[in-house]
Image: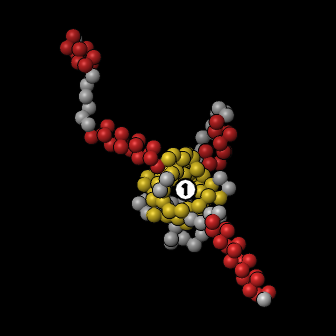
Amino acid sequence: MKYTLWLIVFFCSSQLAQAQGLGVYQHGTVVRMRMGDCAFVHHGFMVSMSGAPAQTSAEVCPEYTLVSDKVVFVIVGRSSNQLVPLADVIDFRFHKNELVVRIDDEKQESKFTIREMMLRTEWDRIQKRLDEQRNTPDRVPDSMLAMRTSQ
């Protein structure tokens, strides 16, 4: 009887933890990577926004754009060796204001600082606008033509 009671308590608590989303991974695709300054990661948000002169560092950190179903994240690694493969679906979760990423090949998780978040619909609209601007030929404004003809 004691055994079944403990089994029921364990089962209910595990279901509650899953329902609250504790430790459950979400899926996303890495669509962009660039190397950037690590100052944001090391000094934090308040120092970056304070207007104090930034100390230049030679260290660069990877910055990734991670696209999930509803949100697009721009995340920054803590060091230059935190590499994530592009166009790969990765598992991630939130942990203490950071994004924890698990890649299939690695045994441990990597922590990334969230630099920017945007709704997926907004990001799609911006990407569509950028594609349209790239595909349309550059037009010279009429005022520029008038200035060229008068010269």
Q: Residue at x 54, y 60 (%)?
A: 82
Q: Position of residue 17 (x, y in %)?
A: 67, 68
Q: Residue at x 54, y 71 (%)?
A: 106
**Residue identified by numbered label 1:** 80
89 shown above or below 74: below
| Residue 120 relative to residue 142: left or right | right
Residue 90 visible in image: yes
Q: Quadrant of the C terminus?
A: top left
Badge 1 marks a residue whose secondary structure is: loop
Q: Residue at x 55, y 45 (%)?
A: 116
Q: Position of residue 35 (x, y in %)?
A: 49, 50
Asked whether 122 or 62 is in front, the reply is 122
Q: State which quadrant residue 149 falls in.
A: top left
Q: Position of residue 54 (x, y in %)?
A: 63, 37
Amino acid type of the residue that numbered disc 1 sits on in the rendered structure: Ser
| Residue 134 relative to residue 124: left or right | left
Name the residue furthest top: 150
Q: Residue at x 63, y 55 (%)?
A: 98
Q: Residues within 10 Å of mark 1 (few under 14, many from 20)?
A: some
83 shown above or below 131: below
Name the residue furthest left: 149
Asked whether 77 or 115 is in front, the reply is 115
